Amino acid sequence: MSKKEEIFRTIIRENKDKISGICRYYSSNEDDHNDMYQEVLINIWKSLENFRGDAQLSTWVYRVSVNTALGFAKKEIRRKKIFIRQDDERLRDLLDYDEGQIQEKEIMLQSLENKINLLSVVDKIIITLVLESVSHKEIASVIGITEPNVRVKIHRIKNELKEMLKNLTL
Amino acid sequence: MKNNKEIDIQNIDTLINQLQSKDTQFKKAVRILQIFFFALIFLYTILYVFNPDDEMDFNQRIGGVCYVLAFTLLAFHFRNKYSKFKNVNYSVSVKELINEAEKRYRFWKGNQFSSFLAIILLDVGTCLILIQYFSDKWSILQIIIGVQVFNIISASIGFIIGYIKWKKEIRPFWISLKTMLKEFEE
C-alpha cells in the first residue's frame, strides 16, 4: 500500500461522518448524496499533496467537502439549494424554539428551508457548518473570513430566521 | 438515507483504483501534449535550422527558429493551462477557491504574454519563410502585408468566436463568482 493510499484511507475512516454530514445538506436524494460523497473523496485524493498540516485535519476535510458541494453545480452555484433534515436537533438549539410552539413541524421546516435558500451562498455555508456543530474558529478557516465576521453573520442569520419563525408560532 | 459506512467504505478499493488510474491518465495526457510539441520543435529544428539544403537562405532559417521558439512557448503555455484546470486545489478556503476560479474564468487574463509572443514569432517566421517562395511574384512589402492581413483576419475571427462562446457559456458563471466574492465582504 502506497503512503498516499494509507493517508487517504485514514482520512476517510476518521472523517466519513463529517463528509457525509456536509453532503447531506447539499443533496436532495440518496443518489445525489452518494455522487457528491464520491466527488469529495476524489477531491481529497487530488488535494492530498496540498495538506501541509497548517490547518486541523477536520478543517481541511470541511474545506474540501464544502468546496466540492459548491462546485457540484457550477453554473447554478448561487442558486445552490440546501436541504434541512427533519430530525435536526441542532436546528432547535440554534433557533431556540420549543416543539410545542410549532403548529405544523413539517410546514415550519419547509418555510425555514425556503428562507435559508434565499440567503447568500456564504450564509448558507455558515448555516450548514453551524448545524454540523463546527466551531466559529473552524468556520472562519473553512470560509476564509475572520472569526468576528463569522459571529456577526451567524447573529444576523439567526435573527432573520427567528423573525420568520415568530410568524409560524402559536 | 443509507449510512455512508455501508455505501462507500465497501467500494473504497474500487475508488482508489479509479483514482490511481485517473492520476496515470492525467500524467499520460500531459506527456502526450509535451511529446506533440517537442515533436514539432524537433521537426522544425531539423527542417529549418539544421537542414543542409543550400537553397535554404538565412531568412528561412531565422523563420524556422521563430517557429521553434513559438512552439516552445506554446508547449509551456498549454502545459501550465492544463495543469491549472486539472489541479484545482479544493483544500483552500471557500473564498480563496472562488477568488482563483474568478481569475481562471475571466475572458481577458493578464498572464497571456507568452501566447502573444508565440503568435508574433509565428507571424515573423511565416513572413521570413514565405519571402523566398513568393519574392519573384510580389515585393517583400506585399508579402508582409499579405501575411498580416491573413493573420489579423484569422486572429479576429478566433477572437470573436472565443468571445461569443465565453459570453454565452462562461460569463454567467463568472458574474456569479464576482457576486459571491462581494458577499464575503458584506
Image (spheres, coloured by chain):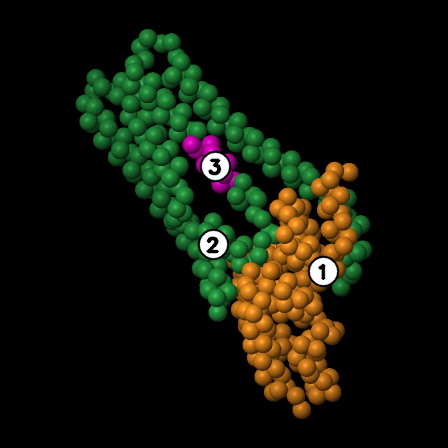
Magenta span: B73-82
Q: What is the spatial separation of the Cα atoms under label 3 and label 1, in whole angstroms?
A: 37 Å
Given the image, on which type of amino acid does mark 3 rest?
A: Phe
State if disc 1 and disc 2 touch (CB < 8 Å): no
Q: Are marks 2 and 1 on the same chain?
A: no
Q: Residue at x 49, y 55 (%)?
A: B99
Q: Residue at x 80, y 50 (%)?
A: B10
Chain B tint as drawn: green
Mark 2 chain: B
Q: Which residue is mark 1?
A: A18
Mark 3 chain: B
Q: Which residue is mark 2?
A: B102
Q: Position of residue A63 (x, y in %)?
A: 62, 57
Q: Which chain is orange?
A: A
Q: Residue at x 29, y 38 (%)?
A: B152
Q: Residue at x 26, y 33 (%)?
A: B148
Q: Nearer the viewer, residue A92 or A78?
A: A92
- Tell me, yes or no, if residue A31 can be seen here: no
Q: Nearer the viewer, residue B67 or B181?
A: B181
Q: Position of residue B180 (x, y in %)?
A: 49, 63
Q: Which residue is mark 3?
A: B78
Dot 1 falls on a residue whose secondary structure is helix
Q: What is the spatial separation of the Cα atoms under label 3 and label 2, in whole angstroms?
A: 19 Å
- What is the quadrant of the N terminus of chain B in the image? bottom right
Horizontal side of residue A16 vs B77, given as left or right: right
Quarter of the view holding residue A16: bottom right
Given the image, on which type of amino acid does mark 2 rest?
A: Glu
Given the image, on which type of amino acid does mark 1 rest?
A: Lys
